[in-house]
Image: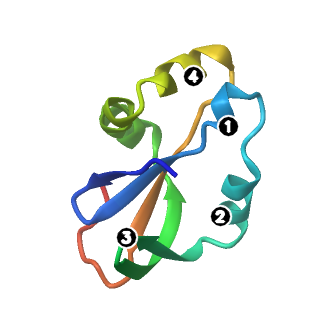
């Protein structure tokens, strides 16, 4: 999965290639936002949340720098493609 970083948070995009429906994993995170994340050798507990519209405007360029096709995916659908913020458990002031 493609991820980005913002301060202590990890970011992922629920793009599903620009489909008109959210990916199942995003729906699962909405239902159960407490997750365990592993990035290479770093494993940590986190809470997943959808970035607000204001946060998304600030975070989207971080993610399109990593994967430019996200802009194309957003243009393919009327669905607002969410940026998911994975806030490391115990981190203070980690949100965008």
Of marks 2 and 3, the one in the foreground: 3
In the image, what residue occupies the spot 42% across and 32% down?
A: 67
Q: Earlier in the sequence, mark 2 or mark 3?
A: 2
Residue furthest out toward the front? 40
Nearer to the camera, 87 or 10: 10
Q: CA distance from mark 2 to mark 1?
A: 15 Å
Nearer to the camera, 91 or 24: 24
Vertical comparison of 27 with 15: above or below: below
Decide: few, some or many residues near mark 3? Use Cα within 10 Å; few <14, some 14-19, many ≥20.
Answer: few
At which x and y percent is residue 77?
68, 20
Q: Secondary structure at mark 4?
A: helix
Q: CA distance from mark 4 to mark 3?
A: 29 Å
Q: Earlier in the sequence, mark 4 or mark 2?
A: 2
The residue that mark 1 highlights is 16
Q: Earlier in the sequence, mark 1 or mark 3?
A: 1
Of marks 4 and 3, the one in the foreground: 3
The residue that mark 2 highlights is 29
In the image, what residue occupies the spot 28% across and 78% down?
A: 91
């Amino acid at each position: 999965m493609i991820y980005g970083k913002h301060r202590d948070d990890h970011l992922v995009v629920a793009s599903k290639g620009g489909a008109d429906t959210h990916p199942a994993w995003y729906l699962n995170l909405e239902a159960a936002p407490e997750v365990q994340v592993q990035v290479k050798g770093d494993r940590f507990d986190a809470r997943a949340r959808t970035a607000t519209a204001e946060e998304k405007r600030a975070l989207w360029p971080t993610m399109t720098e990593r994967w430019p096709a996200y802009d194309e995916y957003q243009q393919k659908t009327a669905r607002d493609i969410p940026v998911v913020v994975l806030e490391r458990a115990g981190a203070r002031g980690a949100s965008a």
